[in-house]
Amino acid sequence: MARGYVIVLWIMSMCMNLISSFFLYRLSGLLVEYRKKLRFLFLVWCMFLLILPIYDTDATNVLGMLAAFLFIVLICTRGELINRISAVLIFYPLILGLNYLLYNNPVYSFKTNFMLLFQQNSNDLAGVDYLLCFAASFFLDLLRVLTWALLYYGFKKRLEEIKRYMSGRIWLIISVICTISFLSMVTVIIFPPFDAETAAEFYNSPGLFYASYRTLVIVISGISSIIGILYLLQPVIENVKNRQTLQIEGLKEEYYRSLEEQQESVRRLRHDMNNHFQIIKSCLEQGDIRGAGEYLEQFGSSLPAGTGNQFCSDRALNAVLNHRWEKLKMLQADVHFNLEINQVMEVTSLELCTIFSNALDNALEAVSKIQDPGQRKVYLQARTKKGYFSLRIANSKENRMISSHGKIVSDKKEAGHGYGLENIREIAKRYGGNMEVEYTEKEFVLFLYLRLE
């Protein structure tokens, strides 16, 4: 009976721990991208971390948990290093603090004392003692499950938005703030506000649990600060959303302006069409076939070029491309657009428009500074293949490149310039890709790729 009781207790704890680990696994996946072949390893490792006991002055488990969690995140995930480090600094204090609270309380002390008596002499224990131990174990395991479940369902949407909208600079700020809570919790647990003798008595007597109340306050404060940080990021997220809304409105305006220009060209053409037909008809009635042909030739050359090129199936992006195409043509530039991107479903229309508009505006700015129109060249290639979207744009240039902290910036003095390439870089990172630039005295090349799977 005694052996069966221990087995039942162990199976129950493992099942509850598996559920808790699954919620941590899903929660972490909202901020980082798992490597497909190592997802199961991350889940198994989480099961080990969530049952690792944390006690006062226990530097081995505290630092060992940190090293283990950092290792498994770096091995099992991919993407920007700052994002992965931030995930560690967010979730490690939560794991550490929760484990400390679950292993340093009267309920766990009762369970520990029962198991000690059980190992010494199980015959002296009554049935109610077994029931109380089972209830204590179930309560602690259920509390762990509920905590991670509440964290997952409470922050699922928030973490998805953080991953989608936060830039590298915001991630850095998050890391710095979380580091404060992280260091506070680690320090107060490893160096508690009482001496080693009190700590030894604490482990032998549940009544001394309250001697560590200062540590408990700091641990609970650390957990609360992490949760508070995630809540306080909402205004930042809303600001980014509003900025993207303005971008969308600008793209809509550009699209409708393009349609209006086409309709205006059609209206002008219809207005003059009857006169043109009358002149051609008159030439034909008089037998002046040569005159009719010359007039038709002049009429054809006078037709407006329009902005009706069909570069892709996305209407908003097509308007963006047409608008830049017309501007480049007005500069008498040699322009070539080669796009095969009809199947880019994973990337939003706004993100595609942001990539192409910023890249082409950068090329427009460069070629407009070339004095000789014959030297103005822009070549754009974009396609999707084997789960990747790639773009390459090369343009001629004469202006000197200006860099700051290793990044290319605009040489315009007005506020708001110089962020185009960084916007492209942020989108590339968001999809597990990258952006690279190369340049010589006469040419600038921008290349980026996005992972679509």
Image (cartoon, rainbow, N blue to C red):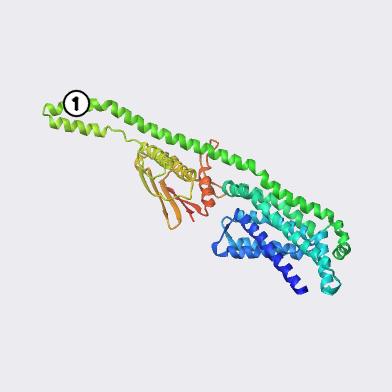
Give left or right: position of 161 versus 256: right
Residue wearing tag 1: 279
Q: Nearer the viewer, residue 29 or 133?
A: 133
Q: Is residue 83 above or below residue 375?
A: below
Residue appearing at x 27%, y 32% in the figure: 302
Give the residue furthest to the front. 127
Residue appearing at x 48%, y 54% in the figure: 452
Q: Is residue 42 above or below residue 281?
A: below
What x and y, as percent, mark residue 101? Answer: 77, 57
Residue appearing at x 79%, y 58% in the figure: 189
What x and y, as percent, mark residue 407? Answer: 54, 48
What x and y, as percent, mark residue 385? Answer: 42, 56
Residue appearing at x 63%, y 58% in the figure: 25
Q: Is residue 347 above or below residue 260?
A: below
What x and y, as percent, mark residue 72? Answer: 63, 63
Give left or right: position of 148 versus 401: right
Q: Nearer the viewer, residue 103 or 66?
A: 103
Residue 68 in view, yes or no: no
